[in-house]
Image (cartoon, grey):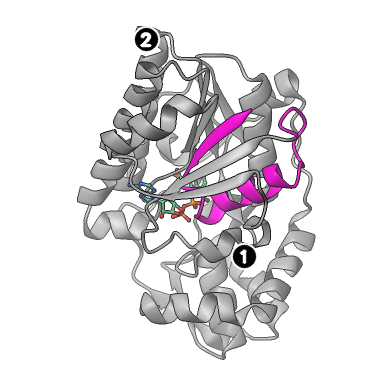
Amino acid sequence: MRILVTGGAGFIGSNFVRHAIQNAYAGLEGAEIVVLDALTYSGNPANLEPIADSPRYSFVHGDIRDNELLDRLVPGVDAIVHFAAESHVDRSVRDASIFVETNVVGTQRLLDAAVRHGTERFVHVSTDEVYGSISEGSWTEDHILEPNSPYSASKASSDLLARSYFRTHGLNLSITRCSNNYGRYHFPEKLIPLFVTNLIDNIHVPLYGEGNNVRDWLHVDDHCRGIAMVLTRGRAGETYNIGGGTELTNRELTGMLLEATGKDWSYVDRVQDRLGHDLRYSVDITKISEELGYEPGVPFAEGLADVVRWYRDNRAWWEPLKERAAL
Ligand code: NAD
């Protein structure tokens, strides 16, 4: 099996590629992986270093919006796992253009290429943020889409396009919607790696508003295992929520990060809340659990301790990224 992984040099895509090459996923053993990645600010070849020498892995530097490139790459693959996206909400608040370009137009071009070349299987990786914000209970997959940020609106648009290619063209496609991920190789603009790298360097951290926003934190290993299950056994035309991590307010999470790095609340600066900041996300994972046997595996305390250790030990990975992005 030959799989095209778009955005495979990013945080989550690279986790999927490393595990697939290491034969961690049932049904994907021995698969060849072709990564297509534009290496934007968040794409990083260093994320793929551990498997870079594998004969089953190859890398193509390019853009999912490039039809000519897609016409060269897509005919040779059996499946596409589509991670490539602009992914940071704050950036979408400042300027939404590239979010529409990459997440909407890019997805449409990739879907068209899959139809043109008869790709047998397509997984579109999306987010729980497309559902909006929920104060109580959890979203099932048939909940209406009420995205609140330009990022989540662009992802919701790509989900609708993906669904339409199943209905209109019969593309064998499934959509995954996952909660907030954490883990190694996470770009240091995001909350957990930003706070950890700041705190170990005795730099203050910015907490939005009162810190009451609730997120369901799932280890990236669990997310990628869920994607592999959907790729190999998910039903065409279906959407699968992935989550079941640990729900925490940003204030609770900040307290845990302070403790893990031996700092106190004097290192926390309250900053003006993000515009349109969703209060709470929560996905119901009954469908993927019952149909595919998915359960989250990494306990949050263990996963977080590993992340803090990893950032302490891998300064050479994150320091240049923070410098370049002026974080
Ligand atoms: P990321 O920003 O770390 O990685 C995105 C990757 O896509 C980068 O390697 C980047 O270079 C590449 N890319 C961007 N534009 C491209 C283009 N035009 N052509 C080719 N490659 C391009 O993001 P991530 O956190 O790894 O997220 C990956 C996917 O998972 C996204 O679709 C995101 O919406 C989804 N998701 C993320 C989370 C999360 O918590 N981070 C949760 C649920 C879903």
- In depth, the one of 66 and 183 nearer the eye is 66
Which residue is found at the position 43% from the left and 29% from the top? Answer: 74
Query: Residue at coordinates 57% horizontally, 89% vertically from top-left?
Result: 201
Image disc number at residue 169 = 2
Q: Residue at x 58, y 26 (%)?
A: 240
The answer to whether 221 appears left or right of 12 in the picture is right
Q: Residue 213's x, y, as percent?
A: 49, 56
> Is 46 located above or below residue 167 in the figure?
below
Q: Which mark is residue 159?
A: none
Q: Which residues are magenta?
A: 1-29
Q: CA distance from mark 1 to mark 2?
A: 44 Å
Image position, residue 295 (x, y; %): 76, 35
Q: Nearer the viewer, mark 1 or mark 2?
A: 2
Category of crowding for the residue at label 2, using alpha-carbon neighbours closer than 10 angstroms: few (below 14), some (14–19), many (at least 20): few
Indicate which disc, 1 or 2, sits on the residue closer to the N terminus: 2
Res 253 label? 1
Would you say residue 3 is visible in this rendering? yes
In front here: 256 or 200? 200
The three-letter amino acid code for the residue at tag 2 is: His
Residue 11 forms part of the magenta stretch:
yes
| Quarter of the image where the N terminus is located | top right
